[in-house]
Image (cartoon, rainbow, N blue to C red):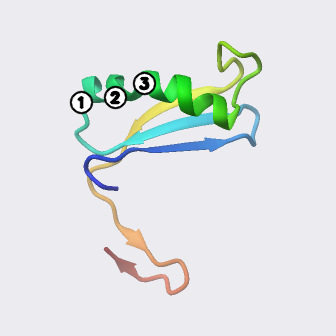
Amino acid sequence: MLKNKAQIQYSPSGPRPIVELVVPHGTHLSDILKVQETISKELLPKIGPRGCAPCISGSDFRIREELEKVINVDLASGRFGD
């Protein structure tokens, strides 16, 4: 993950839909709060994880920090890499 980029992941499957914001290791809460309004007003309505217009009732919203040490694995070959 790039240092100044976050990922928003969404899954409607399972017992409850999940929206997850994954931020780079070391991200400050103040940086997350800067984009929170944009996420809530512009993105969440487009992916539709809600039961009603003003909320995301019934969906879990998680904010998670990417771990500091990440090892990438090529699934086809099973080799570790960058």
Between 46 and 28, the one lying in front of the other is 46
Query: Mark number for residue 36?
Result: 3
> Quick one: which residue is furthest to the top in this view?
54
* Figure quadrant of residue 73: bottom left
Report if the CB atoms under discs 2 and 1 are less than 8 Å apart: yes
Badge 3 vs badge 2, beta-carbon distance below 8 Å: yes
Query: Is there a contact, CB below 8 Å, between mark 3 and mark 1?
Result: no
Question: Could you tell me which residue is drawn at 39 percent across and 69 percent down?
Answer: 72
User: From mark 3 to mark 2, how far is it between C-alphas?
Assistant: 6 Å
Real-space Cα distance between discs 2 and 1?
7 Å
User: Residue drawn 44% across and 21% down?
Assistant: 37
Picture layout, residue 53 above or below residue 82: above
Count neighbours of disc 2 (C-alpha within 10 A) and say few if under 14, some if 14 to 19, many if 20 or more: some
Residue identifier under label 2: 32
The amino acid marked with disc number 3 is Gln
Disc 1 marks which residue? 28
Q: Is label 2 in a helix, a strand or a loop?
A: helix
Task: Using the image as rendered, state which of residue 52 and residue 80 is in the foreground.
Answer: 52
